[in-house]
Amino acid sequence: MLNRIMSVLVKEIRQLRRDTKLLIVIFTFPAFLLVMFGYAVNFDVQNIRIGISDGAKNEMSRQIIEYFSSSDYFLLVSMPDSPDDIIHLLDEKKVQAVIVIPSDISIITYGKGKNPQLQFLIDGVDGNTATIIKNYFNLVVTKLNSQINSEILAKYGRKFSAPIEPEIVLWFNPELKSTRFLLPGLIAMILVVTAVVTVSLSLVREKERGTIEQINVSSINNTELLIGKSTPYVAIAFINAALVLLAGYLFFDVSVKGNYFLLMLTTLIFLFASTSIGVFISVISDSQQVAFTAATLVSMLPSLLLSGFIFPIESMPFIIQLITNLSPAKFYLVTLRAIILKGSGLGTFYMQLFYLIIFGLIFLGLSIVIRKKESVSV
Amino acid sequence: MNSIEISHLTKKFGNFVSVDNISFNVKKGEIFGFLGANGAGKSTTIRMLCGILAPTSGDATVNGFSITKETEKVKKSIGYMSQKFSLYDDLTVGENIDFFGGVYGLYGAQLKARKEWTLEISDLKGKENLLTGSLPGGIKQRLALGTAVIHKPAILFLDEPTSGVDPISRRNFWDLINTLSSDGTTLLVTTHYLEEAEFCHNIMLINAGKIIAGGTSKELKSKFIKGKILEIESNNPVTLMEDFTALPFINDISIFGKKLHLFVNELYPGDEQLRKIAYTKYESEIISVNQITPTLEDVFIHLLEGSHVK
Ligand SMILES: Nc1ncnc2c1ncn2[C@@H]1O[C@H](COP(=O)(O)OP(=O)(O)OP(=O)(O)O)[C@@H](O)[C@H]1O
Ligand SMILES: [Mg+2]
């Protein structure tokens, strides 16, 4: 049995070694993702371009302008006068937000009747960024309020003291660095895409060339064939994951808090689930082209959109939340974040691992049923 | 003793009947030719006999094992070179042999010995580091055959092993087939080349999934070709063919390029008379008339046209 598995494994490695194109794709794909999510798609928002329309032009409004433009978060790029100018700025994306200071704002009105409203217009096209901008704005306004409060109280010889001062500490991601949070998602995505695409392609290739017929009449059985064929790709996926972790450590300062052995174990289980999707795709597709398209779609989209990688699952509609269960990356991501960011142990995520194993078994089972029914080869 | 016994084997794909209730036996040690046009059902039959395609109904035994109930034992008894089989072009000769030997469960000294043997019969000694994709078609086929029998099976299925190979390589390939046969291997071979069928000890003709005729080449010829076959050469064979069908002494006509084969019966009046009829009645000149011995091609065209009963 071991001999037969080894012959398949050796053959697969020999073929892979000569397939320079595939090798390049396999190893540049993670680098591409890393650069894209690590640098280009940076979810840390800084230097938000803003415009301020000053309707009051008094001491108070100057103070507000001064305060916003000195903040790290905001970059004052324009001072529009008319409402038309404001719309223009936002439409042409010259600014991401506009602050409108009403004409009735002034120290004089302080504490008398209604508080003046500081209007804040945000470009909401990118909902994620808009939310972040909104939060920064609130933060700055809160600080501004307490500063004004204390200044005014000081005039009357009083000292300002806030009864409660919040001290927010972001526990698992102290610097709110999104790369730190994204890295586990990246690893999950790279693993699932590498495994699904390479395994399905390598199986369909045998079908397309007709070599599977030869293998089918030999004494090797399905299990031996699948182990032999997927092991090299599982190994490659492993190497890729390790490289991403290393890059995360070197460039983004992310280190693994938890146990490396647990990390390997969960990764292996996740790769089992991913490989089973690859096998399933190879059973239902007849050409490498179909398999490649199906494999990229099925592996990439769910792990990008439904895994919680970028969009938090809790904020999705209930139906979509149910659908997210079809993405094995969702479950792996929970364990990865737990191990890498929190350093938690098996106790917190064994259910996820259990689910991944069930997931893999279901897809392998389906593949065997379909294969038997059509009397076609894997 | 029979190596293969097929009884009422049928395969349907949806409503389409690819193999329709066929039954025949293949004797141990013989070269059995399985012939038929494209889509006749040859490959489908072979795949069922190899245990990789389940029949819709019927059964067969291969080396004494049922193809429906003992597929694993069947697989251990056979070698199979599928129609599409092309080895791995991106592996070297040696690597291909290693792989197929390996999946057949060979290893160590045994694998080494069989590797030597395979290299020898495919004329590739000392060239095991060549990429298989760079080999000429004829050599590739020999290597494919070698890897298909690397585990010394009792029965070998070859599905159009010589298609797309030049005539000289085809002859060499048949030498190899004969060698295997004389070593006691039972061979079931499909081919499009009817002259190759003459090398077979027994022939079965299948059309649209049904068995039409079977027997040795000699039996087939004497059974289906009654009377003489005349080969005539003419300037306008096509019109002449149409004209001649009306004549009572001609049972059947088939056309081979500029030549016509006439299947004549006992009413045939003689060559001179034939020329005269052609000339006076149809204004066609016959250049030559020769009596020929029938080929399998004559038999099959005869059978497939279904016009042998006039
Ligand atoms: N998996 C399949 N699904 C549907 N139809 C099939 C399948 N395999 C074969 N057929 C059909 O069954 C018929 C017989 O096919 P088969 O391959 O056995 O013919 P063949 O005699 O080997 O022909 P060829 O000389 O072209 O190889 C064909 O019409 C083919 O289209
Ligand atoms: Mg065929």
Image (tube, coloured by chain):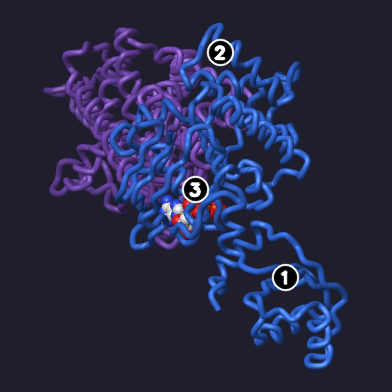
Chain colours: A purple, B blue
**Could you say where residue B176 lies in the image, as x and y percent from the top left?**
67, 31
The structure residue drawn at horizontal position 29% and vertical position 25%, both measured from the top left corner, is: A332
Residue highlighted by disc 1: B261
**Could you say where residue A303 lies in the image, as x and y percent from the top left?**
35, 36
Q: Secondary structure at mark 3?
A: helix
The one of A23 and A244 positioned closer to us in this rendering: A23
Q: Quadrant of the N terminus of chain A?
A: top left
Q: Are marks 1 and 2 in contact (CB under 8 Å)?
A: no
Q: Are marks 3 and 1 on the same chain?
A: yes
Which quadrant of the structure image shows residue A167? top left
* Relative height, residue A141 to residue A270 (above, below): below
Task: For label 1, count other residues whose C-alpha is less than 10 Å away and answer few (under 14), some (14-19) or many (20+).
Answer: many
The structure residue drawn at horizontal position 56% and vertical position 58%, both measured from the top left corner, is: B37
Q: Of tags 3 and 1, which is closer to the observer?
A: 1
User: Chain ID for label 1?
Assistant: B
Residue highlighted by disc 2: B111
Amino acid, disc 3: Ser
Residue highlighted by disc 3: B43
Judge: label 3 CB < 8 Å from ligand 2.
yes
Q: Is residue A278 visible?
A: no
* Relative height, residue B98 to residue A71 (above, below): above
Q: Is residue B151 visible?
A: yes
Amino acid, disc 2: Leu
* Relative height, residue B69 to residue A158 (above, below): below
Q: Of tags 1 and 2, which is closer to the observer?
A: 1
In the image, A115: left or right of A328? left
User: Chain ID for label 3?
Assistant: B
Q: Are marks 1 and 2 on the same chain?
A: yes
Residue at the extreme bottom of the image, as rendered: B281
Q: Quadrant of the C terminus of chain A?
A: top left
